[in-house]
C-alpha cells in the first residue's frame, strides 16, 4: 500500500512494508519508482519459520546426523541471499492423516509457520500452493541379465568404425607385403604387432616410415582400448543395462502392470508401443520378485525394492549376492509435488522466482546428486553388491585380455619356429641334391 503526504514544503511518499504491515517506509520525492517498489530491504532480518519432516529424502532427511536435503538447501540459499533468518521446525507425520491436516492448517492459519517443505503440502484455505517438479515419477523396474557375455566385453570398447579402421590397416599391411616385396620385404603385420628383430637401419626406408605411422596410430588405439576394457571387465561383468524406453521396447521382456494403470498413461507412439508389451495383473504386488518380468512402479518404490533385495541377497549369500533389478534411467512419467506458503506470507512471488533460478542454474540437480552420494555412503557398509565391491573374480577377469595376448604371442612364436625349421630342412635337401 502506498500513500502520499503533501505539505507546503515537500512531498513525502509512504509505503507499507511487505514484511510487516505495521511498519511504514518513507521516501522523498526524488526517489525512483523502482526504488520505491523494491521490497527486498523490507525482508532484511525477517525470521521465516519452516515446517518439515525428516523422512522424505531427497527433500529432507537426517544424513550422517545432519539435517539436509534438496528443499533444505534451497531454503538456505534463498533466505541467506535475501538476508533473512530462518528457523526449521521438525514435525511428525502421524498415522491419522485427518489429524495431521488439521494441525498443519491450524499452524498456517495463526501464522506460526510460513512455509511447509518436504512435499507434504495440500490444498487448504490458509496456504498458497507452489507446484514443483518432483524427483519421483513412474519408472520401469527391469531384471538384470545374469548371462555372461565375454565377447561383448572384448568388442565393446571400440565402435564398429574403429574396428574397421584397424582391419583396414592390417589389410593394407598384407597388400603392401604381397604386391611390393622389394619396398616391404618383411612381414608388416608381424612387425606392427610384435616388432622385428631386424635393426631399424637395415629396414628399407618405406618400411621405416610406414611402420612408424602405423605404430603411433595403434599405440593410441591400444591405450584407449585397454582403459575401456579394464572398466568394462571390472564393473560390467554381465550384459549391460538398458538406458532408454526404446531399448526396452526392442527387448523381449514383458512388462507387468497393475490393472487399470494403462488408461492413465499419455497417448503417444512410444507409450502405445510400451503398452503392447504389458500384462495387467490384479495381484501385481505379489509377483514383484520374479525376474521374468519388468514392472511399472513409482521410482521411489522401485528403489526401495532394489535396496531390500540387495540386503536380503547379501545376508543369504554374502559378497556373492547379486542385484536382481535396476531402474531404467529414462522415466515414463514425472511426478509434480508442492510446497505450501502461508497465505499472508508476501514473499511468495520472490520465493517462486528464486526457485526457478536455482533450477535454471543447475543447483537443484547438483543438490540431488550430493544428497544421493551422501545417502549411498551412509549405506555402503550395509548394502554391498557388485556395483561397489571389487571381487576376486573381477580381478581375474582383467587377466583374460592379458592371457589372450600371451596365447596369441606363444602360438605365433611356435608357428614361426616350425616355419623356420621346415625352411632349414628344405634348404638342406636342396644342397644335398646339388651335390
Image (cartoon, rainbow, N blue to C red):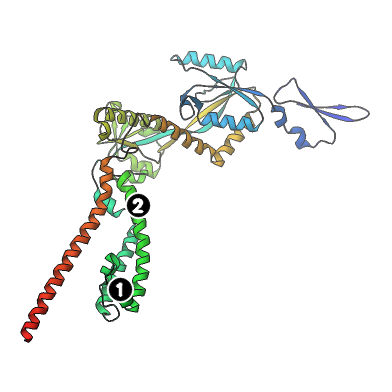
Identify the residue at image location x=30%, y=77%: 202
> Which dot marks residue 199?
1
Q: Nearer the viewer, residue 44 or 7?
A: 44
Residue 233 percent coordinates (x, y)? 30, 47
Please tell me whether mark 1 sits on a helix, a strand or a loop: loop
Residue 324 percent coordinates (x, y)? 28, 35
Q: Left or right of 163: which side holds 74?
A: right
Residue 39 appears anywhere in the view: no
Question: Label 2: which residue?
Answer: 228
Above or below, comparing residue 180 to residue 265 in the picture: below
Q: Nearer the viewer, mark 2 or mark 1?
A: 1
- Picture quadrant of residue 386: top left
Q: Residue furthest right?
A: 8
Above or below, comparing residue 410 to residue 316 in the picture: below
Identify the residue at image location x=37%, y=29%: 301
Residue 284 appears anywhere in the view: yes
Image mark count = 2
Please tell me whether mark 2 sits on a helix, a strand or a loop: helix
> Which dot marks residue 293?
none
Q: Residues within 10 Å of mark 2 (few under 14, many from 20)?
A: some
Above or below, comparing residue 313 to residue 420 in the picture: above
Of callouts 2 and 1, the N-terminal one: 1
Tell me the quarter of the image containing the N terminus.
top right
Q: Nearer the viewer, residue 174 or 350?
A: 174
Residue 334 percent coordinates (x, y)? 45, 36
Identify the residue at image location x=31%, y=45%: 234
Amino acid at each position: 500500500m502506498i500513500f502520499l503526504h503533501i505539505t507546503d514544503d515537500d512531498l513525502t511518499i509512504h509505503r507499507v512494508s511487505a514484511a510487516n504491515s505495521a511498519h511504514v517506509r518513507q521516501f522523498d520525492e526524488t526517489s525512483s519508482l523502482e526504488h520505491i517498489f523494491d521490497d527486498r530491504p523490507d525482508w532484511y532480518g525477517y525470521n521465516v519459520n519452516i515446517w518439515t519432516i525428516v523422512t522424505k529424502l531427497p527433500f529432507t532427511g537426517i544424513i550422517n546426523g545432519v539435517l539436509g536435503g534438496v528443499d533444505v538447501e534451497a531454503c538456505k540459499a534463498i533466505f541467506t541471499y535475501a538476508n533473512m533468518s530462518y528457523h526449521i521446525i521438525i514435525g511428525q507425520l502421524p498415522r491419522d492423516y485427518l489429524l495431521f491436516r488439521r494441525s498443519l492448517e491450524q499452524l498456517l492459519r495463526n501464522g506460526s509457520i510460513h512455509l511447509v517443505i518436504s512435499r507434504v503440502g495440500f490444498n487448504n484455505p490458509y496456504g498458497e500452493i507452489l507446484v514443483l517438479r518432483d524427483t519421483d515419477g513412474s519408472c520401469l523396474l527391469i531384471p538384470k541379465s545374469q548371462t555372461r557375455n565375454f565377447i561383448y566385453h572384448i568388442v565393446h570398447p571400440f565402435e564398429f568404425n574403429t574396428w574397421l579402421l584397424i582391419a583396414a590397416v592390417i589389410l593394407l599391411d598384407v597388400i603392401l607385403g604381397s604386391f611390393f616385396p622389394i619396398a616391404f620385404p618383411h612381414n608388416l603385420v608381424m612387425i606392427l604387432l610384435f616388432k622385428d628383430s631386424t635393426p631399424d637401419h637395415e629396414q628399407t626406408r618405406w618400411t621405416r616410415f610406414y611402420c612408424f605411422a602405423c605404430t603411433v596410430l595403434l599405440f593410441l588405439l591400444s591405450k584407449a582400448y585397454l582403459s575401456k576394457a579394464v572398466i568394462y571387465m571390472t564393473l560390467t561383468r554381465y550384459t549391460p543395462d538398458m538406458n532408454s524406453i526404446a531399448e526396452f521396447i526392442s527387448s523381449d521382456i514383458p512388462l507387468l502392470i497393475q490393472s487399470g494403470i494403462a488408461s492413465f498413461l499419455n497417448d503417444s507412439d512410444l507409450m502405445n508401443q510400451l503398452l503392447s508389451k504389458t500384462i495387467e495383473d490384479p495381484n501385481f504386488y505379489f509377483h514383484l520378485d520374479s525376474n521374468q518380468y519388468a514392472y511399472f512402479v513409482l521410482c521411489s518404490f522401485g528403489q526401495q525394492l532394489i535396496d531390500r533385495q540387495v540386503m536380503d541377497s547379501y545376508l543369504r549369500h554374502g559378497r556373492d549376492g547379486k542385484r536382481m533389478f535396476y531402474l531404467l534411467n529414462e522415466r515414463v512419467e514425472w511426478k509434480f509435488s508442492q510446497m505450501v506458503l502461508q497465505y499472508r506470507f508476501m514473499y511468495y512471488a520472490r520465493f517462486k522466482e528464486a526457485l526457478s533460478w536455482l533450477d535454471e542454474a543447475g543447483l537443484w540437480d547438483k543438490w540431488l546428486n550430493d544428497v544421493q552420494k551422501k545417502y549411498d555412503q551412509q549405506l555402503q557398509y550395509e548394502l554391498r553388491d557388485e556395483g561397489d565391491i571389487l571381487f576376486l573374480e573381477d580381478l581375474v577377469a582383467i587377466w583374460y585380455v592379458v592371457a589372450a595376448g600371451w596365447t596369441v604371442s606363444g602360438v605365433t612364436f611356435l608357428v614361426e619356429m616350425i616355419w623356420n625349421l621346415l625352411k632349414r630342412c628344405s634348404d638342406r635337401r636342396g644342397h644335398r641334391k646339388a651335390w
